[in-house]
Amino acid sequence: DGGITQSPKYLFRKEGQNVTLSCEQNLNHDAMYWYRQDPGQGLRLIYYSQIVNDFQKGDIAEGYSVSREKKESFPLTVTSAQKNPTAFYLCASSINPRQPQHFGDGTRLSIL
Amino acid sequence: DQQVKQNSPSLSVQEGRISILNCDYTNSMFDYFLWYKKYPAEGPTFLISISSIKDKNEDGRFTVFLNKSAKHLSLHIVPSQPGDSAVYFCAASALLPGANSKLTFGKGITLSVRP
């Protein structure tokens, strides 16, 4: 089945460590996105990529980094510079930026 | 500055009745609107969308209405079913330079459908 896979579902890291969240899609979508959801909040855009080897900052990019070396993959690194990294992270993809986005099931990151 | 607003955090309706979920926006450049449904610990799933050239779009039990002059849209679910109980997000997008586009989400509304 085609879809978006985020792994792991739960992730624990010590404060000060960088951590990378995986996002893979086999939908052949050009565009991919990373969002963060906090309790009582909507989804806030961290980074997005319209095409391989290109990405743009979203609304809350500080403390995060991404790469888009392959069409299928869009990993997100949460760096030690991110002040409040504990959150639910969602990856999404779409055929193009004007089509509905399909989401993975998310990764819950907790900083110990 | 919140550009997409879902002012009611929750809504409770009786099974079989109509659920009306509201959404307001402030950015007049938004021209494409979507509704997503989300269960706990899962990603949102796309429900229905509407372009600004329309004022209504229907898909089964789900209908979205758009009032551009009021910058308001609503999602109607008829009849409501217990399985509709979830968080519903309104989202909007505008065409940006370079054919880019990104979604702006509201904070969501929790719908509870009572049996």
Image: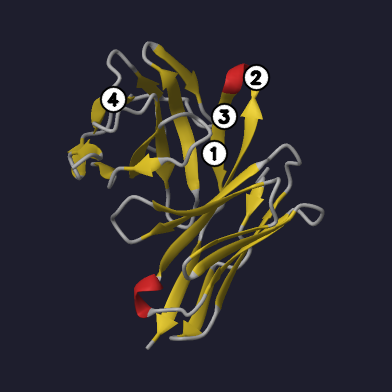
Nearer mark to the viewer, of 4 and 3: 3
> Marks 4 and 1: in contact by CB < 8 Å?
no
Disc 3 element: strand
The residue under the point 48% across, 71% down is B61
A52 up-or-down from B62: above or below:
above
Disc 4: which residue: A75
Secondary structure under the numbered disc 1 in the rendered image: strand
Instruction: Find disc 1 in the rendering and name its residue.
Output: B103
From where the camera sits, is residue A103 visible? yes
Residue B97 image label: 2
Query: Identity of the amino acid at label 4?
Result: Pro
| Residue B6 pos. (x, y %) | 61, 59
Name the chain under label 1.
B
- 4 and 3 marks on the same chain: no
**Towards the viewer: B64 or B12:** B64
Q: Which residue is mark 3?
A: B101
Crowd around label 3: few <14 · some 14–19 · many ≥20 (10 Å): some
Name the N-terminal-most of marks 1 and 2.
Answer: 2
Q: Give the x, y percent position of residue A61.
A: 47, 26
**With respect to residue B56, does A76 lie above or below?**
above
| Tag 3: amino acid | Ser
Residue at the far right: name it.
Answer: B69
Q: Is residue A77 left or right of residue A35?
A: left
Q: CA distance from mark 4 to mark 3?
A: 20 Å
Does residue B109 appear left or right of residue A64 in this picture? right
